[in-house]
Image: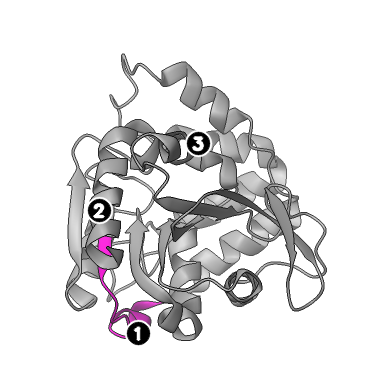
Amino acid sequence: MAWYKNRKGEQLWYEDEGTGCPVVLLHGWCMSSVVWKYQYDAATSLFHDSLRLLAPDLRGHGRSREISGGLSFESCANDLVDLFNCLDLSNAVMICWSMGAQIALQSYAELSGKLAGMVLVSATPCFTSSSDFPHGIAESEASGMRLKVQRSVRRAIDGFFSRMFAATELENHHLLSEITQLLESVSPPDTTIVLDALDALVHTDMRKLLNTVTIPTLIVNGSEDRICLPKASSYIKTHIPGAEQVVFPNCGHAPFLTYSHQFNTELLRFIRSVSG
């Protein structure tokens, strides 16, 4: 657990545990580094102390609250580059969830020489659909999300949580109570940050960046994801040269929570394949 300074002199938070291959975990919209609990729990068992897990709180999120200006994918990408430079990371693997995946793509041009591989979890190059990309949510739905945020950030995020899981995904799940408490423990960002991040999601098209990715890439998604649609993950797979894909059945937007053991097993397999 530590702070680092970005190029603006802002103090940003990151979790840091273990030794070995650096694995950088990027959370999604309105979340924080706490969502990677089950990956940190596995660090001393499944991962056998062979990995160094680093999970930053993106600007405006979690403990990284004291920032100047707002949030954009460019500013988040700059922060990520600064973290790599500050810690002198190399041969790293990035695990990037949802909005974190778009930030990773934004930073890829600068970080590619320091990466051994990348895992894009529940990702999409375009959050909203268009005439030539039907694999996003409708613009009207995104507009509705914005209105809900303006009325109440907490209620909007609670609604987002409810859509993160497939219809029966949490039924009789042995970690239901723990997952619920974990998500409820995440303090929502300020309204301005939430809206900045949502606007960045709605207006960003990263399709042209996909074929620039030349490192080994694993795409992971749930078959029932209602936030970043499964076909968006399949689109990414076909547009990143050599990418492989793992789909979890009856799973929504957060396989690293509800399918944590299987997710961690796939994660370790991939990391070993790219970094030894």
Q: Earlier in the sequence, mark 3 or mark 2?
A: 3
Q: Quadrant of residue 76?
A: bottom right
Which quarter of the image is occupied by the C terminus? Answer: bottom left
Is the residue marked by circle 1 packed among few (<14), some (14-19), or many (20+) residues within 10 Å? few
Label 3 amino acid?
Answer: Lys
Q: Residue at x 66, y 63 (%)?
A: 196
Residue 85, percent from left and from top? 61, 76
Secondary element under disc 2, as helix, strand or loop, is helix
Identified at 33% across, 37% down, the residue is 46
Q: Nearer the viewer, residue 164 or 44?
A: 44
The amino acid sitting under disc 1 is Lys
Magenta residues, start to end: 206-219
Camera-near label (3 vs 1) is: 3
- In the rendered image, residue 71, in percent from the top left (x then y), is placed at 68, 67
Q: Is residue 213 magenta?
A: yes
Q: Which mark is residue 37?
A: 3
Please say whether residue 259 is visible from this viewpoint: no
Q: Decide which of tag 3 and tag 1 comes sooner along the chain.
A: 3
Residue on which disc 2 sits: 230
For the residues labelled 3 and 1, say whether their Cβ atoms are less than 8 Å apart.
Answer: no
Label 3 and label 2: CA atoms lie apart by 24 Å
Distance from the alpha carbon under mark 3 to that under mark 1? 33 Å
| Disc ID at residue 208 | 1
